[in-house]
Structure formats: structure tokens, C-alpha cells
Image (tube, grey):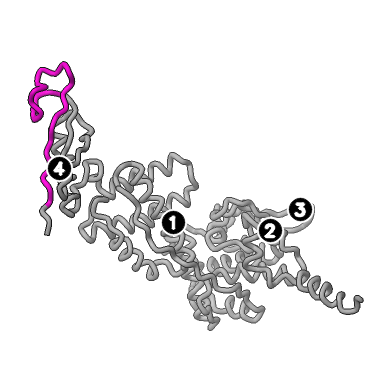
Amino acid sequence: MSTAPLVTIFVRHSVDCRYKGDEFCKRCSCRKHLRWTLNGKQFRKMAGTRSWQEAEAQKRRLEDQLAGRRPEAAPEQQQTIRTVFESFLTAKKVQNIKVQTQQRYRSELERFVAFCEDRSTFTFAAVTLSLLTEYQATWPGVYESSYTRHYVQKRLRIFLKYAVECGYFTRVPKMAPIRIDEPPTMPLTEREYEKLLAAVPRVFGNGRSDRVRGVIQTMRWSGLAVRDAATLKRVELEYDEQKDIYRITVARQKTGVHVSVPIPKHIAKELLGVNPPESEYLFWAPHAAGVTSEEYTGHNRSQEISRVFTEAGIPSDGHMRGHRLRDTFAADLLEKGVPLEEVSKLLGHESIQTTERHYAKWVRGRQDRLDALVTGTWNRK
């Protein structure tokens, strides 16, 4: 077994230095260098400093590296993960990203910081790939969807890259990518939807039942995602006097894309009657008994909807249950001949490719055209 080499500090004096005859002088401010011998070969390296004390720190780190020991963390790497976490959130706020995205970063990274601290890991110098892998192993119990876990990992990497850029972390370990399991689109049948609505009052009582039913109705008839439906404002459900129709006009929280969707008049009147007329929101009642503003989030509404699916006896087979209401809205339109491009706009997708990937098989007109093209070639010579 080879012995770790001894690193020596020496000074290369300037021509006018009064101590130029002593290469180990600690009193001058000339540049410091390091040298060592390994396998019979001598190596030299600039310490990058004029301070003997800083050169000593460089020497210790180099000796640790040559001996195979974990190098001592540089001062900037001794910042706590929690301190860097707060700095990162400030940076995101300065970037003026959406409030919902800022909140997502805070909740997800708070879990990461708490996980590290629970394992006595307080600085980035102690963060390893095995620790990150152990942390990722907890995700299935917190984030049911592989799609969600994929984006949680993506945001974690952005945080770790920020730490690297600030000098708190040497490099981001290469975490194994998370494969997204996208279940096929599964709209509800008319019978299933009736069973779903009938199950709501069996699961929830008082005004909560009306709010959950209102969110379900909104998602089915407008195609909004659960977060958008749950926090829908009264002013976002408009009445068009000229056309005598009600429409929901809102910007999607996930994509920022504006959508404007007409909904049946009887559904609109039901939604408007859930909360008192003076309420700002249609279903969010922050001051109602048992429902606080912190609790009334899209995540909790998803859990409530999942309970209703269970009570109604509607199997999910791995599907995101709340998303099946959005699927029902889209598939119903496509089966009745609404063009895919228009459905994409109503769903608030940023790209029609997204709509096509999920809903192409429900496009009635497309299959009719393909059938006509194929059968039309049969009689040609």
C-alpha cells in the first residue's frame, strides 16, 4: 500500500523581495506554491494565493485528495442547505415567476431540507448521490403520479444547480431519470358520471358537499384542471347577454394560457349558488367552518374527488381520477366532431401536440377521413 505524499509549501519571490533567499519564508506576500512527489515524479502547483494561511488550507485539501480522504469543505461549501434554500427562493421571487410555482418550490424543497437535517446532513459537502436516491425513494408515498415525480426531480436539480453556481456545491450528482407512466385517457360514461354525482353527499355533508360537487361539475363541463376549478372566482364565470350563455374565462395556473369555455346555463346557475353572492370565489370558502384558505388547495380537492370515485365504485386502474373529468369534457367534444385544434384551445394546452398525444383516438372526423381515403382506393385501376 503506497503512502500518501507529503505536500510542501514554498515561495517564489519577486526579484525585489527582501526575503528572496528563503523559499519557506512566511513573512512576505509573494506567491505561494505547492510541491509533492508521487511514484518517483515531482509535481508542482500554484496555490493561487499570497497568504501562507490560505496556502495551508490548499495543502490540507490536496493531501486529503491524494490520500483518498474526503476533502475538507471550502468555506463557501459550509453554508447550510437551509440557508441556500432561502437564498434560492429569494432568487426565484426576483425572477418574478408565478406565485404558484414559487409555492411549489417552497413546499417541495422544504421536504428535501427537512429530510437532510433528519439525517444530520446540514451542508452541501455531505450531500451524496446515495442520499438523493434515498430521498427519491420516499416520493411514491407523497406524489402518486410519476408525472409529478418527474417534475419534482426537475425542480430539485434546478435547486442543486443553483447551489453549484453559487459555489456551495461542487457538482450535481447524476440522478436516474424518472420514466413517466402516462395511463391512457379514460373519459367517464354518462352512467358513471351520474353515479359520481350521487356519491358526493354520501361522502361529505353540509356545504362541503355542494363545494365538491361544484368542482366536479366545473371540471366536467369546462375541462379545467382541479386547481383552476377549485379556486375559480365568481367574476370568471360570466354571462354573455348578447348570446344568452354563460362562459368561464380564466388563465390556467399550470400553463398561463387563457381559456374561454361556454357551459350549460343550468350548470352555471348551480355553480353560482354554491357560495353566497358576496363571496369572491365560487367554491373556496376560507372562513367556513372546517375549511381554511390553506386547506382549500388543488391537492386536497384531488383527494376529495378520489374519495368520491371510491364511494361511487368507479375503478381508476392507475388513472388520475380527477383528470378523468377533464378527459370526459375533451372526448365528448371530439366524438361530436369538434376539431382537435379547437379542443386544444379550450383545454388551455400550450401545444396541439399535447392534445393529440392524449386525445387523438377520440377524433371522430379523423377516422372517418382515413376510412374514406382507404376505401376510395379499392375501385381505382
Q: Quadrant of the N terminus?
A: bottom left
Q: Furthest residue to the bottom?
A: 313
Q: How many marks?
A: 4
For label 2, the residue is 261
Residue nearer the viewer, 125 or 86: 125
For label 4, the residue is 36
Q: Earlier in the sequence, mark 4 or mark 3?
A: 4
The structure residue drawn at horizontal position 16% and vertical position 27%, both measured from the top left corner, is 12
For label 3, the residue is 241
Determine if the magenta segment contains residue 37: no
Q: Earlier in the sequence, mark 2 or mark 1?
A: 1
For label 1, the residue is 154
* Cβ atoms under marks 4 and 3 closer than 8 Å: no
Q: Nearer the viewer, mark 1 or mark 4?
A: 4
- What is the spatial separation of the Cα atoms under label 4 and label 2, in whole angstroms? 74 Å
Name the residue type under label 1: Lys
- What is the spatial separation of the Cα atoms under label 3 and label 1, in whole angstroms? 46 Å
Check disc 2: other Cα within 10 Å, few if <14, some if 14-19, many if 20+: some
Determine if the magenta segment contains residue 7: yes
- What is the spatial separation of the Cα atoms under label 2 and label 1, in whole angstroms? 32 Å
Name the residue type under label 3: Glu
The quarter of the picture where residue 379 lies is bottom right
x, y (%) of residue 289? 43, 63
Residue 28 is left or right of residue 354, and the answer is left
Q: Nearer the viewer, mark 2 or mark 1?
A: 1
Q: Earlier in the sequence, mark 1 or mark 4?
A: 4
Q: Nearer the viewer, mark 4 or mark 3?
A: 4
